[in-house]
Amino acid sequence: MTDKNTADKHAIDNNVAQGIAAYIDYLNQLRVSTLMDTLRQILNNETGQLKDLAERQANALRNLDLANQNVMNIVNSGRGGENGMHGFIAEFAQTGIANARRAFEGLEKSTITLNNNGPADLLINGKPVQVKFYANLMNELKTSAEYRSMDMMFSKDHMDVFRAVMHGDKEVFLNGQPLTSNQVQKIKQIIEEESNIRGLSWDKWMQSSVLKYDQVQREAIDRTFTEETDNIKRQTSEQKSEISNKANTDKAAAYHKAQPNLGEANKAAGVGAAIQGGLNFGIFVYQKHEEGKEIWQFTAEDWKEGGVKTSRGCLQRRVFGLCNLWIDQCLSSFGSERRGDSVRNFWTHRCCHEIPFRRD
């Protein structure tokens, strides 16, 4: 090969090497750009979810604080007296806690305390409701006859008893004590008679409070609100951890996806191999032309020699593409940008000019 041909080959080799490096740089920039977009989206989602959680918690706690203030006013004023105070407490506590739980779920208020000495105590989803919290279950149920134009609400533990009776449970308990068969029969009879008069099944006019009978007593209501507040805060903490953990998992996945992979390495190697293979064959044909032999005059040996040189170029550039990608990622990713450039330049020179390939 003449000096001019050697120089031309070196120039072509340098151009091919630079092209492969540019392609690898493009892959890097594409990965970084995609990673930044993904991280930005993850951050926005996390921030939005945490903001929504904080707002839901604040709304829930405001409902509890307002209800607590109303209840304290009842206690301090002695409204209802010794026997009737817990009924007024139940109305405001039911409203505050039910609305607080809905607020934490991001839902609108469903309950309003009327507090107007009218027949209905609450409006729930626009429907009038009378609240009865009696110690005696039968007396509690019998008051339903006075309020047939509206639904009835009973304490959660009493409603559990009524539900068990109407479902035909063999054993029914209240506060851990079993009801007698006579008590069960009387409860069932009252509910069935009232349902027949109303023309409704029992579960259409009987509602359960979120609170048990003993939770609305004067000596217990402060603890009831404290437990509900703690429950909201506990759920907030759990959801905050879930949001942060999900964001961290998504970030880790994004970083992993942004790392170089075998598919990209093969692309880089394939680009180098295809370009170099074509160029090598072109150079071989030109060299033969310089020697006075045209392509249509090639013998079997000429074609064999051309194939060997073409394959050698493909292999050389495939190795170069793979190694250049490795150098670019392994060195530059550790903050050694200058070192990566130096090693890359050294490797380019070796691949283009000095690495010998055996002919046998």
Image: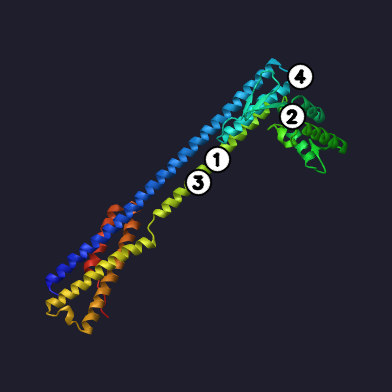
Mark 1 or mark 2: name the one nearer the start of the chain: 2
Mark 4 or mark 2: name the one nearer the start of the chain: 4
At label 3, counting other C-alpha atoms closer than 10 Å, the crowd grade (few under 14, some 14-19, many 20 or more) is some
Amino acid type shown at disc 4 = Glu
Q: Residue at x 75, y 17 (%)?
A: 81
Toward the viewer: 202 or 355? 202
Q: Which mark is residue 239?
A: 1
How far apart are the two marked residues, 3 and 2, measured between alpha carbons? 40 Å
- Which structural element holds mark 1? helix
Name the spot of residue 19 as percent of width and height, x first: 24, 60
Mark 3 or mark 2: name the one nearer the start of the chain: 2
How far apart are the two marked residues, 4 and 2, measured between alpha carbons? 14 Å
Mark 3 or mark 4: name the one nearer the start of the chain: 4
Mark 4 or mark 1: name the one nearer the start of the chain: 4
Toward the viewer: 159 or 313? 159
- Which structural element holds mark 2? helix
How far apart are the two marked residues, 4 and 1, measured between alpha carbons? 41 Å
Instruction: Please give the residue where the numbered disc 4 appears in the rendered image.
Output: 82
Mark 1 or mark 3: name the one nearer the start of the chain: 1
Instruction: Please give the residue where the numbered disc 2 appears in the rendered image.
Output: 214
Relative side of 242 to 221, left or right: left
